[in-house]
Image: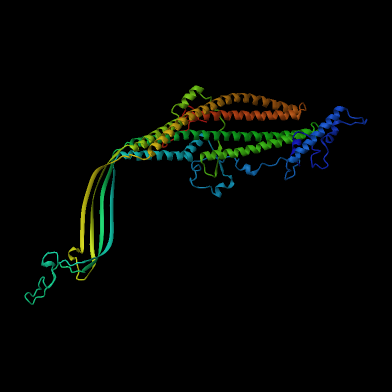
């Protein structure tokens, strides 16, 4: 059956003509008995004819509209069918909590892990927790807050590294080596013509042998090297040296600006951390209040559907007794089906709200949180608008972070410009060394040579030290340094503009929250009056309907007014709490020390709140 057919049932028309287009009577034909009989077969009066033509035109238009809607895959159920069950896929994540969430259950998963099929199976475990417990878990588990803590630690380490530049750098060095070298020395000319005496003369005119006299055998001088004499050897050498060196910048115009820049970056990181705490508390509060609202909406819609079923049964009983027309039964069935749709959507919204809070708290993937605190109205914001704005601007971490960024850029600009100034440094070094040389595989040829210069095994030791000053002065770099300094100056100017933009954003956020807070309080008072009046009206009209003194249409309208007034009161209450949390976010006192424990503050001027 077409979707437009269900629309006609909802508005109370009889389904006589609903069906396929082929052979379908016109709307006027379907409602012809309403006009009444015409026993005298007289022509209808002009008013009746015009009314029938209007009905025919409306019937044609509705047929054309119905043709634009795709047909349903399944045939439409009969209006007499019982109310279908709610989807099981929605009931599982909307299950009642099994107890309070324990500390061990709230431990977050490792940062680089993914959910396992076992953790995702079954929709997870539903556990209750309070708002204060949610805030404590968020401060302990939040990945973004933990990342900002690491950023603060990194900035502190960079500052400590820059402070170390005031001290000299002392380093030790040592090296050792082992190697072999082969060499061959050949005398291209004899050395007996140098005039060094008989020790260099060859035989027989040189030194006589041990026999002496005429019979002695002449021998060459011990230092005589004939032409072509050679000696080959392999030298193995092992060396080791060690010492200390010192470098100290006596004059460095860029050192102090770099340290001030690092200190400003640390201030920026700490203020960013404080602002992250404010943002996280607001996210948790909004998610928790929205989950409370989703819980209450499910209760309202469930009560509405249950009430529909009771009224529907009463209508069926009245129809059986002939006290109400069939139109009332069809309208009640349509209203009950529509309200069940609202209940289904409310269940989906609550499942999403639970998952949203779990994400903000960084809970394990198999845990679904449920709000255990009842909805309690926050008090009126204690400050007026002017006081709130002045307090929001004072020591605001968002603004302080921008000022710290500007200071860091200004100091970086000075450090960069200092690169064009001279830098004076002191250096000193001292150490000792030793080496051992072993000559092996000595081979001589052509009478040999160079025996006096060959030491088979020798050790050489030594030491040295030095001290001095160095000066470095960049005289020309084609404008590179000055260009970098100008770029940092422009970034500093851009930071000033961001400060102005952030200042305006803070005021807009605070004013928007302040006005909405006042409006929500005023609407809550009106919503309470509307609920009281709607409840009394519904009681009266239901009794009148059961007594036959009122029609079903008036009962339906009164029921809708009651449900709308309940939802409006709930929305106004939750908006009061959310806008209070938004105002508190702008003035929340927080510590800039990431190592200090965070105490949840739910009301201005108090360290904790009993909800």
Position of residue 123 measured from the top left corner of the image (x, y, whole percent)? 58, 45
Name the foreground residue: 511 vs 207.
207
* Residue 93 in which image quadrant: top right
Q: Residue at x 48, y 39 (%)?
A: 144
Name the foreground residue: 381 vs 129.
381
Q: Is residue 60 left or right of residue 138?
A: right
Decide if residue 267 is in sight here. Answer: no
Name the foreground residue: 584 vs 399.
399
Residue furthest out toward the bottom? 215
Q: How is the image coloured?
A: rainbow
Disc count in the image? 0
Q: Quadrant of the N terminus?
A: top right
Position of residue 579 measured from the top left corner of the image (x, y, whole percent)? 54, 29
* Residue 335 in which image quadrant: top right
Residue furthest out toward the left? 213
Residue furthest out toward the right? 40
Measured along the vertical axis of the image, is residue 59 above or below residue 519?
A: below
Q: Residue at x 71, y 36 (%)?
A: 336
Q: Residue at x 86, y 33 (%)?
A: 33
Decide if residue 301 is in sight here. Answer: yes
Position of residue 384 measured from the top left corner of the image (x, y, whole percent)? 51, 22
Position of residue 149 measured from the top left corner of the image (x, y, whole percent)? 43, 39
Name the foreground residue: 27 vs 361.
27
* Residue 148 in which image quadrant: top left
């Amino acid at each position: 059956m077409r979707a437009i057919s269900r629309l006609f049932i909802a508005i109370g028309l009889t389904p006589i003509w609903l069906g396929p287009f082929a052979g379908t009577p016109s709307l006027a034909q379907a409602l012809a008995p309403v006009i009444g009989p015409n026993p005298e077969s007289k022509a209808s009066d002009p008013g009746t004819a015009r009314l029938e033509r209007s009905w025919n035109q409306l019937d044609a238009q509705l047929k054309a509209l119905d043709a634009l809607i795709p047909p349903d895959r399944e045939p439409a159920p009969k209006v007499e069918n019982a109310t279908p069950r709610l989807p099981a896929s929605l009931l599982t994540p909307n299950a009642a909590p099994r107890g309070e969430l324990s500390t061990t259950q709230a431990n977050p998963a490792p940062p680089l892990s993914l959910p396992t099929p076992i953790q995702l199976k079954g929709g997870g475990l539903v556990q209750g927790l309070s708002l204060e417990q949610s805030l404590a878990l968020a401060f302990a588990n939040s990945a973004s807050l933990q990342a900002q803590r690491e950023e603060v630690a990194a900035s502190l380490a960079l500052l400590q590294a820059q402070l170390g530049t005031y001290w000299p750098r002392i380093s030790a060095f040592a090296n050792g080596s082992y190697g072999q070298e082969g060499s061959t020395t050949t005398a291209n000319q004899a050395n007996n013509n140098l005039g060094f005496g008989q020790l260099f003369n060859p035989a027989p005119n040189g030194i006589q042998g041990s026999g002496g006299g005429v019979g002695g055998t002449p021998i060459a001088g011990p230092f005589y090297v004939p032409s072509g004499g050679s000696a080959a050897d392999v030298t193995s050498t092992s060396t080791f040296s060690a010492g200390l060196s010192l470098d100290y910048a006596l004059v460095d115009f860029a050192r102090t600006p770099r340290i001030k820049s690092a200190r400003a970056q640390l201030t920026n990181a700490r203020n960013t951390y404080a602002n992250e705490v404010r943002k996280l508390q607001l996210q948790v509060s909004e998610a928790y209040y929205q989950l409370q609202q989703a819980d209450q909406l499910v209760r309202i819609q469930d009560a509405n559907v249950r009430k529909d079923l009771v009224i529907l049964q009463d209508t069926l009983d009245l129809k059986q007794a002939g006290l109400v027309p069939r139109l009332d039964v069809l309208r009640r069935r349509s209203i009950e089906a529509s309200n069940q749709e609202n209940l289904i959507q409310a269940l989906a919204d609550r499942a999403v709200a639970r998952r949203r809070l779990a994400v903000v708290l960084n809970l394990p993937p198999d845990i679904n949180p449920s709000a255990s605190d009842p909805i309690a109205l926050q008090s009126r914001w204690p400050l007026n608008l002017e006081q709130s704005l002045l307090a929001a601007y004072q020591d605001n971490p968002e603004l302080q972070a921008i000022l710290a960024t500007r200071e860091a850029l200004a100091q970086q600009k000075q450090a960069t410009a200092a690169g064009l100034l001279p830098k004076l440094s002191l250096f000193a070094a001292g150490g000792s060394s030793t080496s051992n040389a072993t000559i092996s595989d000595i081979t001589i040829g052509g009478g040999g040579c160079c025996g006096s210069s060959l030491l088979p095994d020798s050790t050489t030791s030594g030491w040295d030290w030095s001290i001095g000053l160095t000066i470095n002065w960049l005289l020309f770099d084609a404008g590179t340094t000055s260009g970098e300094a100008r770029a940092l100056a422009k970034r500093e100017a851009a930071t000033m503009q961001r400060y102005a933009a952030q200042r305006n954003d803070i005021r807009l956020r605070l004013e928007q929250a302040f006005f909405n807070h006042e409006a929500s309080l005023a609407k809550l008072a009106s919503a309470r009056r509307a609920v009281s009046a709607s409840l009394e009206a519904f009681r009266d009209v239901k009794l009148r309907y059961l007594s036959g003194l009122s029609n079903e249409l008036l009962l339906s309208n009164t029921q809708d007014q009651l449900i709308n007034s309940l939802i409006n009161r709930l929305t106004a209450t939750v908006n009061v709490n959310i806008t209070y949390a938004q105002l508190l976010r702008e003035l929340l006192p927080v510590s800039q020390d990431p190592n200090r424990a965070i105490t949840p503050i739910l009301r201005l001027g108090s360290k904790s709140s009993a909800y």
